[in-house]
Amino acid sequence: MDQRLFFPATERNRGPIGDLLNQLLPASGAVLELASGSGEHATCFQQRFPHLRWQASDPDRDHRTSINAWIQHQGLSQVMPSALNIDVEKRPWTLPQTIRGALKAVVCINLLHISPASCTDAVLEESALLLPSGAPLIIYGPFMRNGAHTSASNAAFDQFLRERNHRWGLRELNHVTAIAAKAGFKTENVLPMPANNLSLVFQRA
């Protein structure tokens, strides 16, 4: 039985995200991806960046099953580790020493708006503890800027999320960068992405 999940948004955005990562990721080492979902991003990026070791993770068992099924389907079992069970709010994050010792970047795609605000704190604070100086934390998703939505579609999406769960919703960019600075990151760049999303690029001080 094929246990792979297919997320339409992943197929749409993996090209632009991959192009950005191509400019930001290191030449070697391990990358930790948080909330990897179906695993489509993870296996795509492991294939695109074979010089890196892509460590996918997700707290959802069905998602981890899908990630591992994608790894097997793409013939990556020899080079890509199985998905880790990481709930970002359960700290400290448990990483194998082979990943912890080689960690050079953390990638977080479409997580902050479908989680409570405390999850944002955890992503930034724990990443700061794990990453070496100069290493990037790359966060992708929709955000508010200066207290306002950047598009009507983002405003509608935010309302939809908050109706599903009152703790969810688009985060304010200035608030996120303030938490990042307190955790030990400097904001390297804020880049516009397709479909009214942003990529936040933080660098560990």
Image (cartoon, rainbow, N blue to C red):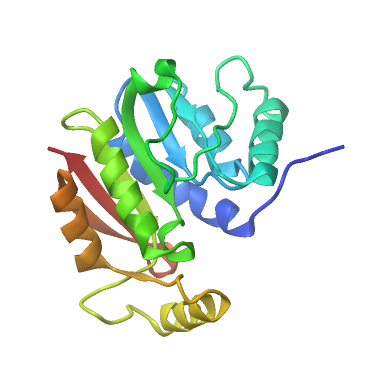
For image coordinates 50% across by 46% down, the residue present is 35
For image coordinates 48% across by 29% down, the residue present is 55
**Left or right side of 150 for 114:** right
Residue 25, position as x, y percentages in the image: 32, 33
Residue 134, position as x, y percentages in the image: 17, 32
Quadrant, the C terminus: top left
For image coordinates 48% across by 83% down, the residue present is 159
Residue 124 vertical placement versus 198 (above, below): above
Residue 107, position as x, y percentages in the image: 39, 42
Task: Answer with the quarter of the image where residue 67 lies.
Answer: top right
**Left or right side of 77 for 46:** left
Quadrant, the N terminus: top right
Task: Answer with the quarter of the image where residue 34 lies.
Answer: top left
Task: Answer with the quarter of the image where residue 132 lies.
Answer: top left
Compare residues 116 and 160 and report the one nearer the observer: 116
For image coordinates 39% across by 40% down, the residue present is 91
Compare residues 36 and 178 and report the one nearer the observer: 178
Residue 188 seen in render: no
Residue 59 seen in render: yes
Residue 61, position as x, y percentages in the image: 66, 42
Furthest toward the right, the residue is: 1
Residue 193 vertical placement versus 94 (above, below): below
Compare residues 86 and 69 and report the one nearer the observer: 86
The number of discs equals 0
